[in-house]
Image: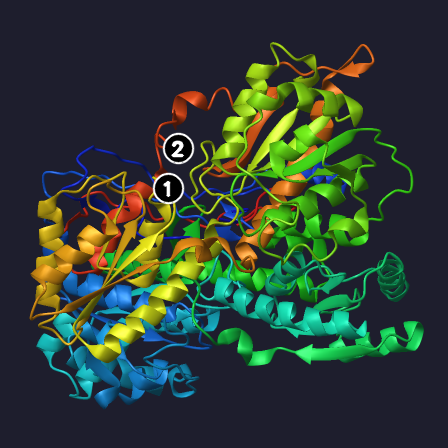
Amino acid sequence: MHKEELHLKFFMCVIQSRLLVRTPQRTAGEASTCSMLIQKPPPETDALKSLDTMDDPDTVEGIPIFKNEWIMTHEDNHAAKTLGVGKAIAVLTSGGDAQGMNAAVRAVVRVGIYTGARVFFVHEGYQGLVDGGDNIREATWESVSMMLQLGGTVIGSARCKDFREREGRLRAAHNLVKRGITNLCVIGGDGSLTGADTFRSEWSDLLSDLQKSGKITVEEAAKSRYLNIVGLVGSIDNDFCGTDMTIGTDSALHRITEIVDAITTTAQSHQRTFVLEVMGRHCGYLALVTSLSCGADWVFIPECPPDDDWEEHLCRRLSETRNRGSRLNIIIVAEGAIDRNGKPISSEDIKNLVVKRLGYDTRVTVLGHVQRGGTPSAFDRILGSRMGVEAVMALLEGTPDTPACVVSLSGNQAVRLPLMECVQVTKDVTKAMDERRFDEALKLRGRSFMNNWEVYKLLAHVRPPVSKSGCYTVAVMNVGAPAAGMNAAVRSTVRIGLIQGNRVLVVHDGFEGLAKGQIEEAGWSYVGGWTGQGGSKLGTKRTLPKKSFEQISANITKFSIQGLVIIGGFEAYTGGLELMEGRKHYDELCIPFVVIPATVSNNVPGSDFSVGTDTALNTICMTCDRIKQSAAGTKRRVFIIETMGGYCGYLATMAGLAAGADAAYIFEEPFTIRDLQANVEHLVQKMKTTVKRGLVLRNEKCNENYTTDFIFNLYSEEGKGIFDSRKNVLGHMQQGGSPTPFDRNFATKMGAKAMNWMSGKIKESYRNGRIFANTPDSGCVLGMRKRALVFQAVTELKEQTDFEHRIPKEQWWLKLRPILKILAKYEIDLDTSEHAHFEHVSRKRSGEATV
């Protein structure tokens, strides 16, 4: 995802399309190919046009949504179980730590052991590789237990001067050869990966020197004749070109957003201006996405220095915000922020400017290393796991002719790229900024970064016009159950509408409020501060419009509504279908409308992801972490957790991947009593190891007979004398809370794109002095599909919908389920007979293409 894309995050994760898996539950043969898509930046035009032409890849705000494809059957599906026999893999983390590194280490260890390879930890990064001894220790399946939810890196990281010298690398090579290790997985930033490539290029000479000095034998040299290197990028800055998201970025955004939310409350109390400095010496990604997440008044990033008169513009912006009734100002500064002449812009400089010119009570907060700390988000856990799986396959399939590669994220696919090509393009960005070629630096960052920048400029720098020059009236409403991020979508929709010169109305309580006339006009300040608020400020109900067409039609006429933006879940979609049917009888309903999917269930046809799902997923993961900690303390305990989602098993599946569950029961994948018994027996065997706890997730409507109580009773009975069982029904806590950075940014982008489409569609539907829209494409769902945010007619989506169970007939995430069992140590066959193509980073100057 130069995810105008996740989550995800998050994400949410797994093995690449070339990884082939077979499970008893699924028998259909499915295949896909993996390709690196070179993304072109949007044309250099005004911001509104840029919004209109956004071709959002599978990233939303740079947060990937994982949609990997794999083949489920193959005649040689036992290949992976012997792929690593006789081989050894070492894994190390180097440079700055990043949340999610432990998930990657865990996946490398478990998948490596699964393939028959021996896997070694290298403690303390390259320093441990040089020092050897106890720093290099063999890993077991159990040794990575309880690692998934930990921040930082359990095996340690360190800066190593010794490895920069040939003598240090000679010692490192000796340590590897003596243990028979010829495969090295390096998790770190561009410096760490560059060091790994140097190590590999010198390998033959190092072996020769070691043999000549008598430190290794001829036989040892022959067995270690070549070294395979695979890199995984772990960096909270998201500054590595060639991958859409780096491990740790999403978690860092979580930390920053939590702090900004906390600071906002005190800033409002005292009418203060806060200047927050976030990490990002060379990359402004964290600052930019944070500004969208919290609705900041201004952001300073190194790729896009402000104009020469930025001081006047900033002060005018802050005073205008205060004059509109705001009690606070938030300014986000990347630590590497500069002006057009390359002079640093510090947070203290900004504070002094605001105090001197405006006299505002101003405070500076430098977030520092708190951004690296804390529990990894669900997205980063799955991203790390997915990359770790692919890294093992890349290592074991490597040959002497295979260049050192980095496992990267391209859209929803894991791809292998030449390590040094990625490093070179990353350096090109820095060089472009050093040479004041800022437009080129921005394009080199990729399309997602550019689109984020365009939306930020619209919402923060464009003054709303005094007159309603657009002359259109658009209404915004929430429908269905509340979902975190709904308010961010409303805010974006309202403000983009006002920027376009339109009149924007808000409807309270969904279709019921539209029928009752609970409608009011919204100004710029009406939605101030809504971005970070959970639930639905407008109120939302599940009522459908069909029974109230007459009243709704009357109010559409009364309030001169010419377009409708509906933000909600399955009820919003079905309500849209009813509006299309109602057009046959009520001309007033012949107005354009667009549905923005917003539901924790992620069950709206036409979109792979919904606003609110990432927040719910993180809530489940946080709860599972605490439950697992409880189980670890009491020993021999299995928890059965019921998640929401209706008939859609998205939450149970993805939370299972992110929390390290032993099983996840869902409606879409039928299971029998034999499957339940097999899971119990699996847990019985697990209790004989050092990992004496279990976690089982159950989607609330996965089976009408195998209820949560039934499964709890079954596990309790069958586990007598071996383990205890407990159950938890998470309930509506999954719908509450402050939205995650992913949901805030996804909602903001969706709202902006929906309103831009709406203005164009209203203009297109203007006939004989009135709006008359009766074509199928005038009633759409705005959804994320593959590599784009696309508008799809609700009538065309009917064939793709299972109305009885309120889910799409095809759901991409079902193809991710086998990875859960692989990492939980089930006997799943992994077929590696099809290989991913080794891609290359392509980059053209003059903005024709970007990485």
As measured in the structure, the alpha-carbon distance from the residue carrying label 1 to the one carrying label 2 is 8 Å
Res 269 → quadrant: bottom right
Residue 531 can be seen, yes or no: yes
Name the spot of residue 413 as percent of width and height, x first. 38, 47
Name the spot of residue 116 as percent of width and height, x first. 11, 63
Work out whether 514 lies above or below 154: above
Q: Is residue 384 left or right of residue 190?
A: left
- At horizontal 46% and vertical 66% (from top left) the residue drawn is 248
- At horizontal 46% and vertical 75% (from top left) the residue drawn is 374
- At horizontal 12% and vertical 67% (from top left) the residue drawn is 686
Q: Secondary structure at mark 2?
A: loop
Tag of residue 646 = 1
Work out whether 809 lies above or below 550: below
**Total residue callouts:** 2
Name the spot of residue 605 as percent of width and height, x first. 45, 32
Discs 1, 2 touching: Cβ within 8 Å: yes
Q: Secondary structure at mark 1?
A: loop
Q: Is residue 775 left or right of residue 359?
A: left
Nearer to us in this view, 492 or 693: 693
Work out whether 412 lies above or below 30: below
Nearer to us in this view, 410 or 10: 10
Could you tell which of marks 1 and 2 lies nearer the N-terminus? 1
Q: Which residue is mark 2?
A: 806
Three-letter code, disc 1: Gly
- At horizontal 47% and vertical 77% (from top left) the residue drawn is 96
How crowded pointer 2 is (Cα within 10 Å; few <14, some 14-19, many 20+) is rated as some
Three-letter code, disc 2: Arg
Res 616 → quadrant: bottom left
